[in-house]
Image (spheres, rainbow, N blue to C red):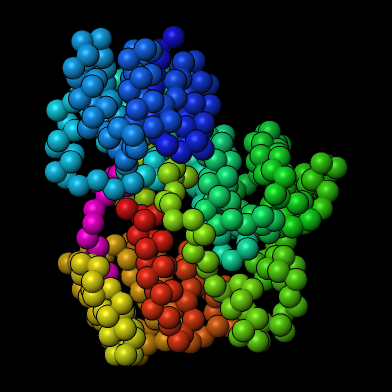
């Protein structure tokens, strides 16, 4: 049995890795900080070390120096995981037999592949095509599932929900599960049950606050025939699901204040910590066949501001004036898409109502070209239909004008942390 030492100060992260790696018959030893990790490394002599770069009581470099000076551990390979790390530090730690460096949020298939290569063991995972995304919008936990159900992804979702509940401090979340492009059949019943049981096993989630958005008849019959899922409602349209879940009737959305408070305002995390595991796999292909590669976290960012209002463009520039980020202003969508051929952006602020080429036309263009960019939409329009249309393009960050500087900064930081 191969032994793996996991050194990370997040109990949630350590426990998840320990549980996952134990499924592959690894013996997992946990180090709660740099000092504890050093002691465990010395006494246990692992076959592999997985460690966070930022540690207390003893730094990552000090742990690596201790490993190098001990003949019993000098040749033990190391995988470093970090939310952010400079290129100079990458060069520094590479000399300590660090074989891989991954950025958080971590993609589990990439980690398992590296472990397989470093320890020369075969690790099989469920390869069923599946895309799962999870995020909070106010008190609502949105879970988007497409293509199919994957056992590994459902396990990751369980971890992700725990992490999100800790980040956002929501005691009793309302849950909307949106399923698309999935043809459910009888053979999918075990995975569908795994998904629902995983969600309902949490004491925070009450079935009466769970809505499933799907057009698949099998899901409706499956829910109806299982007493364990009594209270869960299946809807065939987003409008019905949202009206039912939030407790608003359609005409209630005519009041901007109610709509904003209940639906439009995407809340920032209550805790100032980043997410540690991604729900997407490194092996997933995007349009055109390109495989997205994990990026080394960077301190700089390139941001596009697409709005015909000069005041808004100047506001965004002022808010981020001390961040060191590059701000590229565009007065309409046409200017932006023209420049997009020669510019790479980490984040886009996009107005919906503009001359020549409006925000929805920009979103259609990006979708047609297969370009995936983190986008924050802002508009003076707050009608429910506008928000639903924006969400149909995958937009989950929607700010209503007039804009507040602190909200701009919070939302930008939230998306950049997720995508870096």
The residue at the point 72 percent across, 79 percent down is 250
Is 236 covered by the magenta stretch? no
Q: Considering only vertical position in the picture, is 395 above or below 249?
A: above
Picture quadrant where residue 78 is located: top left
What kind of secondary structure does the magenta stretch mostly adopt?
loop
Q: Considering only vertical position in the picture, is 8 above or below 246?
A: above
Residue 392 visible to the viewer: no
- Which residues are the magenta region? 290-304
The residue at the point 31 percent across, 77 percent down is 319
Which one is in front, 215 or 350?
350
- Quadrant location of the N terminus in the rendered image: top left
The residue at the point 29 percent across, 62 percent down is 346
Provide residue 98's location: percent of width, then percent of height. Answer: 22, 28
Q: Is residue 281 left or right of residue 269?
A: left
Which one is in front, 360 or 245?
245
Q: Considering only vertical position in the picture, is 88 above or below 96?
A: below
Provide residue 130's location: percent of width, then percent of height. Answer: 51, 43
Residue 205 visible to the viewer: yes
The residue at the point 81 percent across, 41 percent down is 228
Provide residue 335's location: percent of width, then percent of height. Answer: 24, 81
Is 302 covered by the magenta stretch? yes
Provide residue 387's location: percent of width, then percent of height. Answer: 55, 75
């Amino acid at each position: 049995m191969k032994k793996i030492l996991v050194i990370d100060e997040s109990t949630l992260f350590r426990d998840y890795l320990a549980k996952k790696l134990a499924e592959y018959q690894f013996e997992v030893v946990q180090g709660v900080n740099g000092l504890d990790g050093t002691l465990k490394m010395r006494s246990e002599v692992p076959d592999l070390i997985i460690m966070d770069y930022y540690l207390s009581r003893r730094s990552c470099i000090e742990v690596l120096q201790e490993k190098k000076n001990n003949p019993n551990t000098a040749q033990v390979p190391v995988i470093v995981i970090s939310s952010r790390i400079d290129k100079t530090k990458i060069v520094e730690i590479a000399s300590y037999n660090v074989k891989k460096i991954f950025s958080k949020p971590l993609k589990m298939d990439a980690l398992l592949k590296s472990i397989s290569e470093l320890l020369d063991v075969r690790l099989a995972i469920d390869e069923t095509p599946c895309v799962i995304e999870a995020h909070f919008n106010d008190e609502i936990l949105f879970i988007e599932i497409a293509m199919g159900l994957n056992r590994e992804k459902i396990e990751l979702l369980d971890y992700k929900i725990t992490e999100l509940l800790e980040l956002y401090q929501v005691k009793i979340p309302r849950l909307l599960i949106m399923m698309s492009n999935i043809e459910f059949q009888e053979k999918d019943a075990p995975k569908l049950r795994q998904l629902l049981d995983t969600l309902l096993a949490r004491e925070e989630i009450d079935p009466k606050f769970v809505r499933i958005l799907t057009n698949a008849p099998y899901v409706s019959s499956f829910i109806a025939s299982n007493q364990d899922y009594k209270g869960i409602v299946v809807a065939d349209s987003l409008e019905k699901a949202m009206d039912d879940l939030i407790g608003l009737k359609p005409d209630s959305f005519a009041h901007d204040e109610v709509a904003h408070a209940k639906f439009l305002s995407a809340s920032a995390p209550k805790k100032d910590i980043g997410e540690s595991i991604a729900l997407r796999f490194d092996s997933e292909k995007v349009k055109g066949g390109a495989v997205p590669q994990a990026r080394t976290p960077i301190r700089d960012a390139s941001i596009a501001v697409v709005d015909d209002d000069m005041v808004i463009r100047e506001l965004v520039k002022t808010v981020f004036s001390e961040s060191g980020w590059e701000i590229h202003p565009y007065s309409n969508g046409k200017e932006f898409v023209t420049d997009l051929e020669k510019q790479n952006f980490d984040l886009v602020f996009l107005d919906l109502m503009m001359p020549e080429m409006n925000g929805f036309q920009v979103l259609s263009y990006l979708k047609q070209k297969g370009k995936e960019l983190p986008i924050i939409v802002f508009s003076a329009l707050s009608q429910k239909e506008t928000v639903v249309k924006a969400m149909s393009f995958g937009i989950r960050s929607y700010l209503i004008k007039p804009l507040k500087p602190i909200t701009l900064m919070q939302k930008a930081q939230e998306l950049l942390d997720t995508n870096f």
